[in-house]
Image: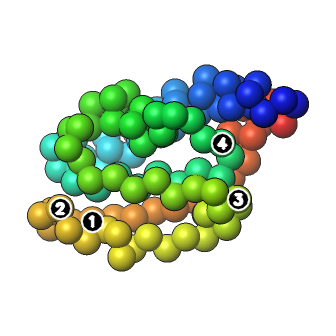
């Protein structure tokens, strides 16, 4: 598959999929969008510009001032990243970092 087609499919599928997962996680956690001070996005599948982090901020309604980190270009090793040192700060008393990897997005992309 040509790289441009793969990246176009990533944009088409990843933004709604990840936005939905984030919305449900925030609802399940019982927190408000204003309580989120840090966004860490890990992707080993594809990349877009502006980044997936920027799209998430817009799609789920996070503050444009939220501190964010994008971890990528690591292949599947990105899932093993332990960004707990990135979770401190932002003046928020509670931070949780969770990083999971699976092939859902690859299935959605048709691979």
Residue lying at the far right in this picture: please name it: 1
Which circle's residue, 1 or 3, is located before the other in the chain? 3
Checking the image for residue 46, the label placed there is 4
Which circle's residue, 2 or 4, is located before the other in the chain? 4
Which circle's residue, 2 or 1, is located before the other in the chain? 2
**Left or right: 54 in relation to 16:** left
Checking the image for residue 90, the label placed there is 2
Q: Check if mark 2's residue and mark 1's residue have beta carbons within 8 Å.
A: yes
Report the Cα–Cα distance between label 2 and label 4: 28 Å
Q: Secondary structure at mark 4?
A: loop
**Left or right: 70 in relation to 86:** right
Checking the image for residue 75, the label placed there is 3
Report the Cα–Cα distance between label 2 and label 1: 10 Å
Report the Cα–Cα distance between label 1 and label 3: 26 Å
Report the Cα–Cα distance between label 4 and label 1: 26 Å
Q: Quadrant of the N terminus?
A: top right
Checking the image for residue 104, the label placed there is none
Q: Which residue is mark 1?
A: 95
Between 99 and 29, the one lying in front of the other is 99
Which circle's residue, 3 or 2, is located before the other in the chain? 3
């Amino acid at each position: 598959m040509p790289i441009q087609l793969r990246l176009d499919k990533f944009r088409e599928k990843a933004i709604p999929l990840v936005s939905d997962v984030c919305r449900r996680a925030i609802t399940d956690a019982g927190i408000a969008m204003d309580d989120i001070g840090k966004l860490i996005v890990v992707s080993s599948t594809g990349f877009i510009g502006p980044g997936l982090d920027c799209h998430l901020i817009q799609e789920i309604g996070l503050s444009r001032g939220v501190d964010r980190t994008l971890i990528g270009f690591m292949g599947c090793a990105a899932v093993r990243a332990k960004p707990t040192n990135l979770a401190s700060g932002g003046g928020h008393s509670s931070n949780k970092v969770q990083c999971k990897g699976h092939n859902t997005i690859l299935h959605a992309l048709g691979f």
